[in-house]
Image (cartoon, helix red, strand yellow):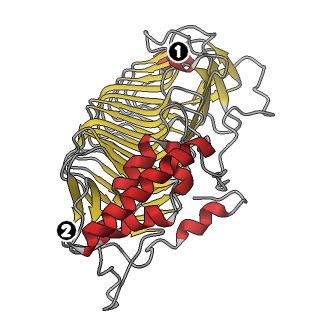
Amino acid sequence: MTDGWFAAVAGAMLVCSLVGAAVAATDGGGGDRTVEWTPDVPDVRGDGVEAPDEPGVATIGDREFDSVQAAVDAAESGETIHLERTFEERVSVATPDVTLTSETDAAVIDGGGEGTVLTVTAENVTLEGLWIRESGLDKTDDDAGVRVTGSGATLTDLRLTAITFGVWIGDTTDVTVENSTVAGREDVAVEQRGNGIHLWEADGTEVRGNAITTVRDGIYYSWARNVHAAENVMWDLRYGVHYMYSNDNHLEDNVAFDNDVGFALMVSEGLVLEENVAVRNDGPSGHGILLKDVEDSEIRGNSVVANGNGLYVYNAQNNAIADNLVLENDLGIHVTGGSQGERVTGNSFLENGQAAYATTNAQVAWNDSEGGNYWSGAHTVDRDGDGTSDIRHQPAGTVETLVHEEPRAGVFAESPAFDTVRLAESSFPVVESPGVVDHRPLAESPHENWRTYYDHEDHDH
């Protein structure tokens, strides 16, 4: 028998003797989080902004109309319709290449609480600088602020308030939604709300610089492809971003905070999720980034901070999870549901309540030959100074399984008994206990930006 084997047995005996006392001594739970980081967000509802109360005027050249619909019907392709003040109507745009714009204070189109406020069926229509509000409340009929079924549309600098769906885009190509705000109804239950930006069979959509709150999901994808979403901020939602059956999409530099789930990636492949921020997503599901039935995707360079689960990986296959900052979550990464082939490298797992947990009866090697991850509290030895430890680290092993299954035992998570078991699992020759092993843990964290999330001033990501 090896010294490692004896150490493991001794450690296990100590653990067993301590667990009963630990369970009796505490109700569990960690300390309060200290992360108070919040991004700057706009005034999405226009609180303090008075909507013009005078009847609206629509102008095409020197022609004036008292309704938007009358102006749209009179417009020819290529013309611009200038809107002022408030219109109480619902509008359908069937003329291609027209622009509806408000060049001064936002003109208001108020749907009166029925149906969709503005429907775009023609191609290459531009909506700019409008305040669109008071759609119907019927989620099953997709009542929306704006419904787009015409390709090539551009929606920019819109304010959408008191809506069910914000922007509903379906069966289209090359639509752009940018620099707009979407705020649903606070007095409507979450399950009765629509999504902020809803993409159904949309191809080549650009979603950039939008602020979305108080709807169900911020950006929802269903059978959508080649969508580029960047610089959006989403809060007080069920899911910030939600993919379903949507392949080959790119999500970068977005912020999802104070939701149930930050980024929910489901039943999709070929996704790229990079340089995003997920903070304090700790509702009933409580995931920063969720991967469920996701294949051949990249989760790279994201900051996952103060969530329930930082990363939750379920039945995911052959994905790269690399260079992410995983900071002060209840659980850094949870791998379960038969996930296989995950390549986990270059991440920093810092100050999480528990770094990792894997539901497995085998030992899973994340990094057999390449550089691994940084784990706060890991025992590392870097004799040759190459930045990686000469001994492996098992962040999800016997102790982690025990603490996860019986959280009250966590009172002794840093005890000598637990450390003895961890040391045995990280030795070579090794005790091959089930769980996750990192063969080349990093000696130092590659992430210097972790301090940002302890700055109590608002931070512009």
- Numbered tag placed on residue 368 in the rendering: 2
Q: Nearer the viewer, residue 7 or 340?
A: 7
Identified at 57% across, 45% down, the residue is: 280
Secondary structure state at the residue bearing disc 1: helix
Tell me if 50 is positioned left or right of 406 in this view.
right
Q: Is residue 243 left or right of residue 331?
A: left
Report the Cα–Cα distance between label 2 and label 1. Answer: 48 Å
- The amino acid beneath tag 2 is Asp
Circle 1 residues within 10 Å: few <14, some 14–19, many ≥20: few
* Above-or-below relation of 22 to 314: below
Task: Return the x and y of residue 213 as percentages of the image width and height.
Answer: 59, 33
- Where residue 83 appears, x then y in whole percent? 62, 28
Q: Is 215 or 397 nearer to us in this picture?
A: 397
Q: Residue 14: where, in percent of width, then height? A: 43, 58
Secondary structure of the residue carrying tag 2 is loop
Residue 192 numbered tag: 1
**In this view, 268 is above or below 232:** above
Q: Residues within 10 Å of mark 2 (few under 14, many from 20)?
A: some
